[in-house]
Image: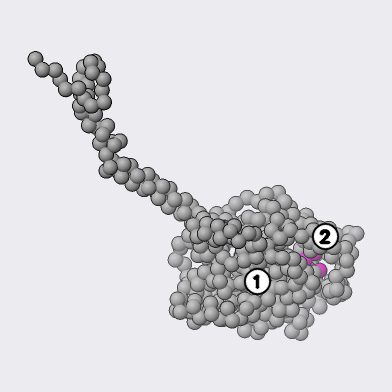
């Protein structure tokens, strides 16, 4: 009687349990772990799994999109800083929905190139190139004066422009650049346009802030970062926190007027905002490469601003902080109303606006945050002493009328 063949790899004389087929087991092991096609299938499955994970991660990074199809034909909109990035994508979507958009940019040449591109893509001819340098308070006043001569209404104001982590420089008025452009310029612009916004109610104000406000504190003793300047964690973060405190204070002031104001974090977006990055060249190359996948596109970054500007459900929502199209709670120092009140009064002095509220007892009406006298203090004080002066009909006082 012949003996059964010993399967390869087994020890002669090995006893197998009943029902066990050693030959079939050997073939199965060869197919699963030793065959070329078996390894190819395994590698393919791993690659598909990684691709699916990365696709889902990419979708999460890009965030939700505003998909409602409501139109805003004939609505008048101002968007600051919109010749590129988030601002340009915002204007493009608003133009597609029929808005009449004033593109307020510092560089008129780049703004015109963006305007022509958006006109071609949206088939909307109601786009206007207007010069606005937020680093110059006089430029802000000139922009508002021209806008008011052209339009009797304003339905949506989107304060989108900003600079980030630049070397310490000063604005045309002598203020720290990031605080001056990101906060003071928009503070003055918004206040000068409040009469148009109220006249057009229900209307909306959208303030583009940043999650960097988490690292910011309002330095009352050194508001202009003269003693200690940090490009990102200092000046930039403070200016973004100022955006949020401005939003909260303004929402209280505008209660019952039909004008809402909300702020948002657009996300970590692949834009020109990080052009002042000063790290090693290799690190900059790594960040640029990584940003292609791990940063939001400008279109994705514009979605929260678009929801705040367009969503009918948010018509009565005000004083909120949004990210990825959802409302989020604020940390304690970003909702401190005492700081918001102080910053509002300080900002009025710095830009030369008459105060809406009397200063607290014991504080000089013309003293700024660095303990020095504001050059516009005498004008502000005289306006406070005579409230009727805010209603005078000269060109200058019409521009600063916030009632």
Which quarter of the image is occupied by the C terminus?
bottom right
Which quarter of the image is occupied by the N terminus?
top left
State whether residue 332 appears in this view.
Answer: yes
Residue 244's spot in the image, x, y percent? 68, 59
- Mostly what secondary structure, the magenta segment? helix
Residue 338 colored in magenta in the image: no
How far apart are labels 1 and 2 at the CA level?
40 Å
Q: Secondary structure at mark 2?
A: loop
User: Which range is magenta?
Assistant: 345-349
Residue 264's spot in the image, x, y percent? 60, 59
**Image: 149 above or below 199:** below
Residue located beneath label 2 in the image = 227
Q: Nearer the viewer, residue 297 or 32?
A: 32
**Image: 147 above or below 67:** below
Residue located beneath label 1 in the image = 198
**Residue occupying the point 61% across, 81% down:** 108
Q: Position of 353 compared to 292: left or right?
A: right
| Label tally | 2
Q: Position of 384 compared to 86: left or right?
A: right
**Residue occupying the point 49% across, 57% down:** 293
Q: Nearer the viewer, residue 214 or 253?
A: 214
Residue 137's spot in the image, x, y percent? 74, 75
Q: Residue furthest left?
A: 1
**Residue occupying the point 63% across, 69% down:** 161
**Residue occupying the point 89% across, 59% down:** 361
Q: Nearer the viewer, residue 333 or 6?
A: 6
**Image: 79 above or below 245:** below
Q: Quadrant of residue 389?
A: bottom right
The mark nearer the N terminus, 1 or 2, is: 1
Residue 348 colored in magenta in the image: yes
Q: Secondary structure at mark 1?
A: helix
Colouring chosen for the image of the structure: one colour
């Amino acid at each position: 009687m012949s003996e059964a063949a010993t399967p390869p790899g087994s020890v002669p004389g090995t006893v197998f349990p009943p029902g066990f087929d050693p030959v079939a087991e050997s073939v199965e092991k060869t197919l699963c772990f030793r065959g070329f096609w078996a390894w190819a299938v395994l590698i393919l499955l791993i690659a598909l799994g990684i691709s699916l994970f990365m696709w889902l991660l990419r979708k999460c990074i890009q965030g939700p999109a505003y998909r409602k199809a409501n139109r805003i034909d004939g609505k008048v909109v101002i968007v600051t800083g919109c010749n590129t990035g988030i601002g340009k994508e915002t204007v493009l979507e608003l133009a597609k929905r029929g808005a009449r958009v004033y593109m307020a940019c510092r560089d008129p040449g780049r703004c015109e190139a963006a305007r022509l591109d958006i006109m071609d893509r949206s088939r909307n001819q109601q786009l206007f190139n207007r010069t606005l340098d937020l680093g110059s308070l006089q430029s802000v006043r000139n922009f508002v004066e021209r806008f008011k001569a052209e339009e009797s209404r304003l339905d949506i104001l989107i304060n989108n422009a900003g600079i980030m982590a630049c070397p310490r420089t000063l604005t045309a008025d002598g203020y720290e650049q990031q605080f001056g452009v990101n906060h003071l310029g928009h503070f003055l612009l918004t206040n000068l346009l409040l009469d148009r916004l109220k006249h057009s109610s229900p209307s909306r104000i959208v303030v583009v802030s940043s999650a960097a406000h988490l690292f910011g504190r309002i330095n009352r003793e050194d508001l202009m970062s003269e003693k200690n300047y940090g490009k990102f964690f200092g000046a930039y973060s403070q200016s973004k926190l100022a955006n949020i405190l401005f939003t909260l204070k303004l929402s209280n002031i505008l209660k019952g007027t039909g004008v809402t104001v909300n702020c948002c974090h657009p996300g970590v977006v692949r834009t020109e905002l990080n052009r002042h990055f000063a790290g090693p060249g290799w690190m900059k190359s790594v960040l640029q490469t990584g940003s292609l996948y791990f940063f939001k596109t400008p279109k994705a970054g514009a979605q929260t601003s678009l929801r705040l500007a367009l969503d009918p459900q948010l018509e009565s929502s005000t004083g909120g902080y949004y990210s990825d199209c959802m409302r989020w709670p604020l940390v304690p120092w970003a909702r401190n109303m005492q700081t918001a009140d102080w910053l509002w009064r300080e900002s009025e002095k710095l830009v030369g606006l008459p105060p809406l509220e009397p200063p607290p007892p014991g504080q000089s009406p013309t003293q700024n945050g660095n303990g020095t006298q504001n050059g516009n203090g005498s004008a502000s004080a005289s306006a406070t002493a005579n409230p009727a002066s805010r209603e005078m009909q000269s060109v200058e006082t019409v521009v600063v009328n916030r009632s």
